[in-house]
Image (cartoon, rainbow, N blue to C red):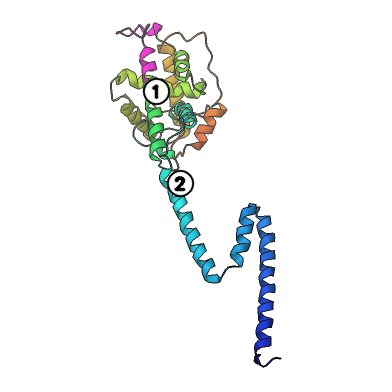
Amino acid sequence: MTGNEGPGSEHTASSTASGVRTNQNIVSAARQYVERKRLHGDQVTALEVFLNEPPSLCEAKMVADLWALGNQVEKIVTSKPAFEVSEDCETNICKYAPAVLLSSKINVYKGNGITQILTHDWAKVLAIVQDALTQTRSKVKKEIAWSLKVNKSDELRAPLAQHKNIYQLAQAIVKGTQCSVNVVLCARITVMRAVYLEHPGGKFWDEMDKRLTRIRRMGGNDAKKITRGFHQALEADQAKHGVKDGYKLDETVVDKFQQKIDDLIDIRIVDAATTSSAQGAVVV
């Protein structure tokens, strides 16, 4: 020990040496960690430099980097384009709209009743759905009107024998969709045609909703009675409009596609046309 060395000089030197060793251990551990994270080579080098800088400078750099990151996130958020319904999504909506509207689970055709089955109220998606349902309602109503004429352009209705039979009408309505013609579908369309004959104007769908309400009320929400009523209405339509011979309705309850739609619809109502073994009936 020289004359200039104090009693704590040896301890200070030892601490400095120990500090360097500890720092290198941290750098080594950090290097292994960033390798597992697969950082770029220049990022690894920058981290090693960072670890050897004074703590106050490290803190200042971290704050600066956080602000820089925030600025980049803000750019991404502000430059993000407005949400639009994709073409594929719109296509799917238009594909499902007829199946929803023609489902025997539906108890209302106007208002927001149908769109309330959507889990979330996304305004733009909801607008597309509502438009698809509107277009489908328009098509169904037009096909019913045309089923009563020989030619679409005719102003007057044709004699009953020249009307489209229920099978032809159902085929026209489901054309271009994934729905198939069966007894359940025809029974529902039968009621639509009966209501149209009484209310062909702008209140047709409102009157259709009233008819469904009346059917459920008269049937006491008894599925068998309501189903039997729909089937009797179908038989009456077959006897009244067009030629009954020459076709056979599929007795299948519903096809797989329609069943999937029916299962998705939140029903707290009577299924009006799915049980063929009903006893008793209501007047539809």
What is the number of the mark on residue 76? 2
**Where is 157 relative to 103, above or below?**
above
Q: Nearer the viewer, residue 171 or 118?
A: 118
Rendered location of residue 207, percent (x, y): 31, 27
Residue in the picture at 47% in, 29% down: 87
Q: Quadrant of residue 82?
A: top left
Question: Quadrant of residue 240 in the image?
Answer: top left
**N-terminal of the two: label 2 or label 1?**
2
Q: CA distance from mark 2 to mark 1?
A: 54 Å
Residue beneath the point at 50% across and 33% down: 262
Q: Position of residue 246 (x, y in %)?
A: 52, 8
Q: Which residue is mark 1?
A: 191
Along the horizontal axis of the image, is 273 left or right of 139? right
Image: 113 above or below 73: above
Q: Secondary structure at mark 2?
A: helix
Looking at the image, can residue 267 be seen?
yes
Q: Is residue 116 above or below residue 178?
A: below
Q: Amino acid at mark 1?
A: Val
Q: Position of residue 23 (x, y in %)?
A: 66, 71
Q: Position of residue 272 (x, y in %)?
A: 45, 30
Q: Nearer the viewer, residue 283 or 114?
A: 114
Chain part drawn in magenta: 140-162
Q: Quadrant of the C terminus?
A: top left
Q: Would residue 284 be seen by someone viewing this image from the given angle?
A: no
Q: Residue at x 66, y 76 (%)?
A: 19
Residue 112 falls left or right of residue 178? left
Tag 2: amino acid: Ile
Which image quadrant for residue 269?
Answer: top left
Q: Residue at x 34, y 31 (%)?
A: 110
